[in-house]
Image (cartoon, grey):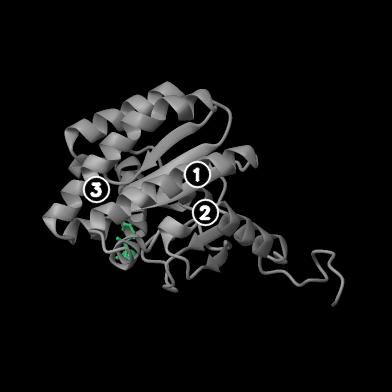
Amino acid sequence: MDGNGRWARQHGRNRLAGHRAGVRTAREVVEYCGKQEIEVLTLFAFSSENWSRPAEEVNGLMRLFVEALQREVRALDDNGVRLRFIGERRNLPTMLQKRMADAEALTSSNTGLTLVLALAYGGHWDIVEAVRSIAERVQAGELSPENIDEVLLEQHIALAGLPAPDLLIRTGGEKRISNFLLWNIAYSEIYFSDTLWPDFGVDCVEEALQFFSQRQRRFGLTSGQIGATGD
Ligand code: IPE
Ligand code: MG
């Protein structure tokens, strides 16, 4: 979800106003994805690297996350949304950590959209955590190094148990991954949009889904092997 700061500048507002506008867009997009029966939506809200932004912006974002959870969780629960957080929680404000845990507990048995919020998340952090927990299991004698394979590593990655993303959308014009779900996006289709996140409404999501529906997914095979016409 990139472009909140530029959106704010364009509208003569401060960066936090841009983030607030971003939360409104997130709410619309979540609602739309729920209705479309999308299984999982993961939103990258705050990266490991975002901690290095000016303290005023970081603190404002933390307050915004607390407020947004307080305001939205009940409606999300009513709509059958299951919430899950990925990222390094330890460094988040205690109040936010509590809201996150409460929201996860409240919605854990819901069967609609799984909404994953990546907060203080980094793809590198995720892989390091997975490696550490595997190393601990080896040290404890539960596993031997020969048992380490892709399936096992995947089970220790933050999105364990959820399907790999089919589609990755980056808004705001940059064409890079910026340390998002590195392990899981090996075969994701990637959609880059110049639209700034606060302006990325339902029409933009529809356009992205349209793009996705036209992709031929081969996962390393030939089009002949997957039964497509052409070759
Ligand atoms: C993304 O918008 C939101 C967060 C990283 C929290 P930015 O804040 O990166 O917006 P730009 O890139 O400055 O426009
Ligand atoms: Mg940015």
Camera-side mark, 2 or 3 = 2
Q: Nearer the viewer, residue 124 or 20?
A: 20
The answer to whether the beta carbon of the residue marked 1 is less than 8 Å from any atom of ligand 1 is no
> What residue is shown with label 1?
28
Inspect the image, locate mark 1, and give the three-letter code of the amino acid beneath it: Glu
Residue ID at (36%, 51%) = 21
Q: Nearer the viewer, residue 159 or 225?
A: 159
- Is residue 156 shown to the viewer in this render? no
For the residues labelled 1 and 2, the Cα–Cα distance comes to 7 Å
Spot occupied by residue 183 in the image (x, y as percentages of width and height)? 46, 58
Name the element at disc 2.
loop
> What residue is shown with label 3?
61
Q: Earlier in the sequence, mark 1 or mark 3?
A: 1
Question: Where ligand 2 lies, by quadrant?
Answer: bottom left
- Is residue 42 shown to the viewer in this render? yes
The image shows residue 59, relative to residue 223, as above or below, that is: above
Q: Residues within 10 Å of mark 1 (few under 14, many from 20)?
A: some
For the residues labelled 2 and 3, the Cα–Cα distance comes to 21 Å
The image shows residue 148, relative to residue 3, as above or below, that is: above
The answer to whether the beta carbon of the residue marked 3 is less than 8 Å from any atom of ligand 1 is yes
Inspect the image, locate mark 2, and give the three-letter code of the amino acid beneath it: Gly
Camera-side mark, 1 or 3 = 1
Residue ID at (78%, 71%) = 223
Name the element at disc 1.
helix
Tell me, yes or no, whether the two marked residues, 1 and 2, touch with CB atoms within 8 Å: yes
Query: Which quadrant: the C terminus?
Result: bottom right
